[in-house]
Amino acid sequence: MSPAQKIVVESEELAQRTAEWLAGALQRALSGGGRCSFALSGGKTVGPIYRTLAAMPVPWERVDFYFADDRCVPPDHLESNYFLAKETLFRPAGIKLEQVRRMEGEREDRDAAARDYEALLPPTLDVVLLGMGEDGHTASLFPGLAAVEEQQRRVLAVVGPKPPPWRLTLTLPVLNEARQVLFAVAGEGKREAVRRVFAGEDLPAGRVKNAVWILDRSAAGQ
Ligand code: 6PG
């Protein structure tokens, strides 16, 4: 696999360096005027990144927010990626919730929620932040799921091994069409998955091409 760029940082600087990269990517996306689209991930790694990003000089009023995935829980649930982003980014940065396109995974008809979200997506996302699990999943594209092979649908409801099980997720065509994609991966537990991805093994995270990877030394195996 040939990622566009791999940046290895000290663990304690991962949030700062990732937030700086994202702020730069957003400013590049906005340089032509108008608005840009930014898709967020969830998990433990991104919270400190969002808190750091919230204080950076980005014209937030010109950014439309989306999600790479979200768990099928209410928007005020502790497991909700929307809830995480609201508490660590939207509220601290004064971002109006009208700028945020939330995945409505709590709806009983998850497939309808996925199709409705497809209709909200722009043709091409400008900036996407992704994480990676120890099994090499990204968004909610877990190894072995049919959703990893999906080439037509842009949003799917899936059942994954990481609780909570039901999630809505963008599919690889959407992630691979995005203009600027960043993986932020930290911790010893990700080291083997990072090694496998960069060795060219077929894991979902490795199927996202032309991404920049910011890794801490533990995840990078250094
Ligand atoms: C999710 C995320 C998921 C996450 C990875 C890494 O909804 O869980 O979108 O793809 O980014 O699982 O999560 P950690 O940062 O908690 O290791």
Image (cartoon, rainbow, N blue to C red):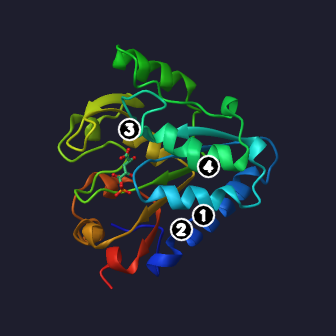
- Tag shown at residue 19: 1
Q: Earlier in the sequence, mark 1 or mark 4?
A: 1
Residue at the disc numbered 3: 171
Q: Is residue 156 above or below residue 107?
A: below
User: Label 4 near label 3: C-beta < 8 Å?
Assistant: no
Mark 2 lies on a secondary structure that is: helix
Residue at the disc numbered 4: 89
Q: Is residue 124 above or below residue 56?
A: above
Q: Spatial distance from mark 2 to mark 3, Cα to Cα?
A: 26 Å
Mark 1 lies on a secondary structure that is: helix
Residue 79 or 177: which is nearer the viewer? 79
Residue at the disc numbered 2: 15
Mark 4 crowd level (few <14, some 14–19, many ≥20, 10 Å Cα): many
Q: Is residue 212 above or below residue 41?
A: below
Mark 4 lies on a secondary structure that is: helix
Q: Earlier in the sequence, mark 3 or mark 4?
A: 4
Q: Residue at x 21, y 47 (%)?
A: 143
Quadrant assignment, res 86:
top right
Q: Spatial distance from mark 3 to mark 1, Cα to Cα?
A: 24 Å
Residue 127 or 44: which is nearer the viewer? 44
Q: Tell which tag, 3 or 4, sits nearer the viewer.
A: 4
Mark 2 crowd level (few <14, some 14–19, many ≥20, 10 Å Cα): many
What's under tag 2, amino acid-wise?
Ala
Mark 3 lies on a secondary structure that is: loop
Q: Position of residue 150 (x, y in %)?
A: 30, 34
Does residue 116 show up? yes
Q: Tell which tag, 1 or 4, sits nearer the viewer.
A: 4
